[in-house]
Image: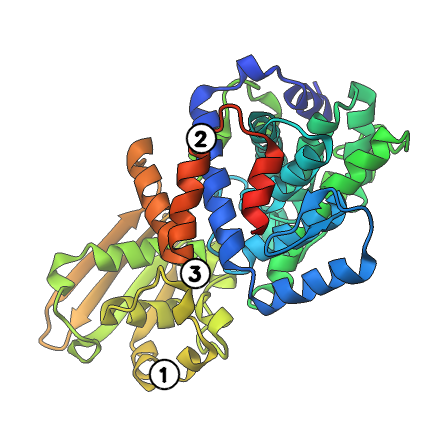
Amino acid sequence: MSLIDRVIDLAQLPADRLPQRAMSLARLSLLDWMACGIAGTEEPLAVKLRMLADLEAGRGVASVVGDGMAPARMAALVNGATSHALDYDDTHFAHIGHLSVAIYPAALAVAEEIDAPAEAMVEAFLVGAEAAIWIGIVLGRAHYNLGFHQTATAGAFGATVAAGRLYGLSREQLRNAIGLCSTRASGLKSQFGTMGKPYNAGVAASNGVECAKLASLGMTSSDDGLEGMQGFITTHSPAAEQAAGDRSIESFIFEDNKYKLHACCHGTHAMIEALLSADALKGQSLNDVAALVLRTNPRWLKVCDIKRPRTGLEVKFSYNWLAGMTIRGDRTGDDRIYQDSLSDDGALSAFANKVEVIEDDALTDMQARGVLTLKDGAKIKLYHDLDAELPQHVLAGKLRAKAEALIGARGAGLWQAFADLTGKSAREVGSAFRK
């Protein structure tokens, strides 16, 4: 069976066949995504996109985070970009991207438009996320390494599947929606460290709503926009992989989704956790360190190895700066500290010269290994693997604490209101999102 047929099967999978563990994680993703979105509402990118929404006007059917209502497509654009503005959202390493910021905005916008239950919105997100992972795996690392941002490319297909499920598209309409998305999906890694990176997520969500809506109106497209002649996969990946095509639609890779507990690029988190867990490093200052040799998966060197960041945004993608911040005791989980002035911090600048980052293809995307040498000659071995699974109740506690750190009492309120979605509507969720 072709990949597009398997994706359509996935999109139409009955709710009672969705894995319960995956659904539980999808509910946690909703709460984490909402907290990130609300926390990002005053970012310059978010303000500019709300201005765009006001300028375009239109029929307000979906909530815009921060304030107001807008057409579903525009709401998805604003909410997707805003929720990725802090770069504090979840990551799936097989998909190589951020799922919630591309897919939940589309699911919420359409669910509000049609007045769907909140649980139906979560179900749509889950199948959309799984579809994005499958397509991301088939595109493979060659697609990512070529310079494409899979949050935006594979993510757009996930957003299309989520929106299409909520609109109740037929099998043929879903095929057309996916085909239309194949000519719309876009996003480049060259935008990393700028407002263009979160904009990529918003574009993906917006594309999903637009393509699903057009298909519902009868617009047609190619028979197979994924693997067909000059389809998306064949034109966007020089070494496409086929691993996802054989997966069971009831064994969800989404269950490997990871959540950020530090407000910076996920590629740096294993290093941060390795430094935090090194007991021998406790009580040491930046001046006590002679050298740090860090080993990381090669692909991260093109993502988060900015040697001399110029802005607070670029600091989020700098091993050298973040290592110093962690050792110094800076609260890397507090997005408010990533100000432009941080790039001019003299102590961090001096420490950056002591850090050497080496690629090591024996390490996975979620691992970091290193040796820190103190001035007295003592060596401290460092290692962390983000793939170590946390029990869901532990993860829920950490995400709730993160929400409260980001948006205070409002974060606690989100968890009180929506930890249980029974009887809740998507419009209730949207109302809490925009207040």
Q: Mark 1 or mark 2, which is nearer the start of the sequence? A: 2
Looking at the picture, how far across and down is residue 66, in whole percent? 59, 56
Does residue 308 appear in the picture of this structure?
yes
State left or right for residue 304 relative to residue 209.
left
Q: Mark 1 or mark 3, which is nearer the start of the sequence? A: 3
Q: Is residue 144 above or below residue 55?
A: above
Q: Mark 3 or mark 2, which is nearer the start of the sequence? A: 2
State left or right for residue 25 relative to residue 177.
left
Q: Which residue is mark 1?
A: 345
Q: Residue 264: which disc?
A: 3
State left or right for residue 244 relative to residue 366.
right
Quadrant of res 266: bottom left
Q: Which residue is mark 2?
A: 255
**Separation of disc 3 and disc 1 at Cα?**
17 Å
Q: Is residue 313 above or below residue 298?
A: below
Residue plotted at (36% across, 56% down): 405
For the residue marked with disc 3, what is the amino acid? Answer: Cys
Q: Residues within 10 Å of mark 2 (few under 14, many from 20)?
A: some
Foreground of the two, 295 or 37: 37
SS assignment at label 3: loop
Q: Residue 104: which disc?
A: none
Residue plotted at (31% across, 59% down): 272
Looking at the picture, how far across and down is residue 75, in whole percent? 70, 49
For the residue marked with disc 2, what is the amino acid? Answer: Glu
Q: Quadrant of the N terminus?
A: top right
**Separation of disc 2 and disc 3 at Cα?**
22 Å
